[in-house]
Image: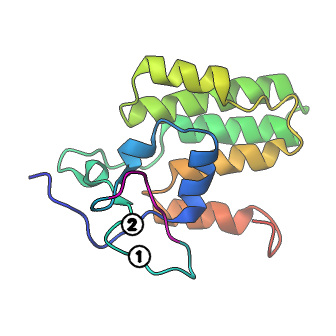
Amino acid sequence: GAGANIFFFANKTVFDPMKSKEDPRIPRYFTKGEGATDYIAVGTEEEATSETATISMNLYKKDAPEVLASYQEICFLIAEAYARGLGVSVNMSTANSYYSDGIEAAMKFYGVPQADIDTYKLNNLVDLTKAVSPIIEIREQQWIDFMERPLDAFTLWRRSGVDGSE
């Protein structure tokens, strides 16, 4: 059955960056809390209430794929390689192309309709060729994509910078 997930709540570290860019994956990642008119996430200093959004049971359905490495994950890693010049010359245009492909693949993976993906890319997709911190933009999308793969998210966090800049 659909059920309700009362054990895992929407966390601000994933939810806030999604909300700031009107990410269409929000209703696929989270379920609104009881009686809430919008999604409410919590951080480490806040108590969850019945109105706090929970992790969507859609992510835990019985036929949900078990992912070892996804196409979007590979796109984000290639984007990072080009943005940082890891084994290749820095090429922000190529990095941007892989970044965009990764976001589109991540949204398709969670069943976001193509029209919503196109709207997101038109209105909210960061252009890495103009971004102040393109590596951070890539890693933010990696982090969002790894929300339901906590070990991979932890590995990304550990390799992403010095203490305090992750």
The residue type indicated by label 2 comes to Thr
Q: x, y (%) of residue 126? A: 74, 32
Q: Secondary structure at mark 1?
A: loop
Res 87 seen here: no
Magenta residue check for 45: no
Please give the count of numbered marks on the rendered protein.
2
The residue located at (43%, 54%) in the rendering is 39
Given contact means CB atoms under 8 Å apart, are the residues at marks 1 and 2 in contact?
A: yes
Q: CA distance from mark 1 to mark 2?
A: 6 Å
The residue type indicated by label 1 comes to Ala
Q: x, y (%) of residue 113? A: 39, 23
**Residue 19 to residue 42: above or below:** above
The residue located at (46%, 17%) in the rendering is 115
Disc number placed over residue 48 in the picture, else none? 1
Q: x, y (%) of residue 146? A: 51, 53
The residue located at (19%, 44%) in the rendering is 63
Q: Quadrant of residue 102?
A: top right
Res 77 seen here: yes
Q: Nearer the viewer, residue 110 or 74?
A: 110
In the picture of the structure, the residue carrying the numbered disc 2 is 52
Q: Nearer the viewer, residue 71 or 110?
A: 110
State the quadrant of the C terminus.
bottom right
In the picture, measured across the screen, residue 54 lies left or right of residue 57, that is right
Q: x, y (%) of residue 127? A: 78, 28
Q: In the rendered structure, which segment of residues is drawn in magenta?
A: 36-42
The residue located at (57%, 82%) in the rendering is 45
In the picture, measured across the screen, residue 155 lies left or right of residue 134, that is left
